[in-house]
Image (cartoon, rainbow, N blue to C red):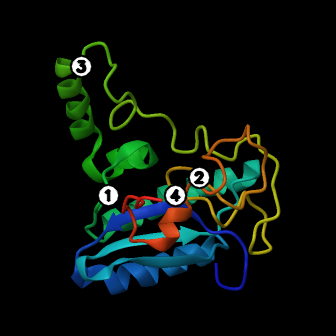
């Protein structure tokens, strides 16, 4: 986060029609300000796809409640701009609870009926699109003590890799999730997703 502090994934991957991107981003910035948040957008703006790292407070009950309220409000904003909550990577657990805002309850109910035909026992990807967990349920930071982050803010670290929880600089014991130190070092030397070379 420019100027220090932590920035977390949390509103990633929405997309709006490219012709609406400017208006969406202005409204999005206004919504961030309403919640006292800062965000760093990046993504595929030419396609209208936006990723944003946001300085959510995921350490306190109030912060998690604000995360939920912001997620609901920004989902409504994306839909109001004719967009999709998932522009590139799919809905998954992060947005499944919000899908009725985009598709409507009836269509999401049909998703569930089709899933039940092919998966009557509910064992395939439970809670991913239908009958999801709450979007603020089981956040990674729940119950952890805050650590001083690299940016001077509070957090498990500026090094946390989105989606994996892997962090090289978290400063926590070996019994806390993530690979051992150095396991991700190869990523800094090559293209993202490129397998490490020999030696």
Relative to 26, 115 lies left or right: left
Q: Which residue bears the numbered disc 4?
A: 162
Secondary structure at badge 3 equals loop
Secondary structure at badge 4 equals loop
Query: Within 10 Å of the Cα at label 1, are there few (<14), some (14-19), or many (20+) other Cα atoms?
Result: many
Q: Which residue bears the numbered disc 1?
A: 86
Residue found at x 25% / y 68%: 82
Mark 3 touches mark 1? (CB < 8 Å):
no
Residue found at x 59% / y 52%: 166
Mark 4 vs mark 2: in front: 2
Residue extending farthest to the front is 199
Q: Which of marks 4 and 1 precedes in the sequence?
A: 1
Query: Within 10 Å of the Cα at label 2, are there few (<14), some (14-19), or many (20+) other Cα atoms?
Result: some
State the separation of the CA atoms marked 4 and 3. 30 Å
Mark 1 vs mark 4: in front: 4
Relative to 119, 24 lies left or right: right
Q: Position of residue 158 (x, y in %)?
A: 66, 67
Q: Which of marks 1 and 3 precedes in the sequence?
A: 1
* Rendered image: mark on residue 166: 2
Q: Which of marks 3 and 4 precedes in the sequence?
A: 3
Q: Which residue bears the numbered disc 3?
A: 119
State the separation of the CA atoms marked 4 and 2. 8 Å
Above or below 185: residue 152: below
Above or below 131: residue 105: below
Query: Within 10 Å of the Cα at label 3, are there few (<14), some (14-19), or many (20+) other Cα atoms?
Result: some
Residue found at x 81% / y 54%: 146
Above or below 12: residue 135: above
State the separation of the CA atoms marked 3 and 1. 24 Å
């Amino acid at each position: 986060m420019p100027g220090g502090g932590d920035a977390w994934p949390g509103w990633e991957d929405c997309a709006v029609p490219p012709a609406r991107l400017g208006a969406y981003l202005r409204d999005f910035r206004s919504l961030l300000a309403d919640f006292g948040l800062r965000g760093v957008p990046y993504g595929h703006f030419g396609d209208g796809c936006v990723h944003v790292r946001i300085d959510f407070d995921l350490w306190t009950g109030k912060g998690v409640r604000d995360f939920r309220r912001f997620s609901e409000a920004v989902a409504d904003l994306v839909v109001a701009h004719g967009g999709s909550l998932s522009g590139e990577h799919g809905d998954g657990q992060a947005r499944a609870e919000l899908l009725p805002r985009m598709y409507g309850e009836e269509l999401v109910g049909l998703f569930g009926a089709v899933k039940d035909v092919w998966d009557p026992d509910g064992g395939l990807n439970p809670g991913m699109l239908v009958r999801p967990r709450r979007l603020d349920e089981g956040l990674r930071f729940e119950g952890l003590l805050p650590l001083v982050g690299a940016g001077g803010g509070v957090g498990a670290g500026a090094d946390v890799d989105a989606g994996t929880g892997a962090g090289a600089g978290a400063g926590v014991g070996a019994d806390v999730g993530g690979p051992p130190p150095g396991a991700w070092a190869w990523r800094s030397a090559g293209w993202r997703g490129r397998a490490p070379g020999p030696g």
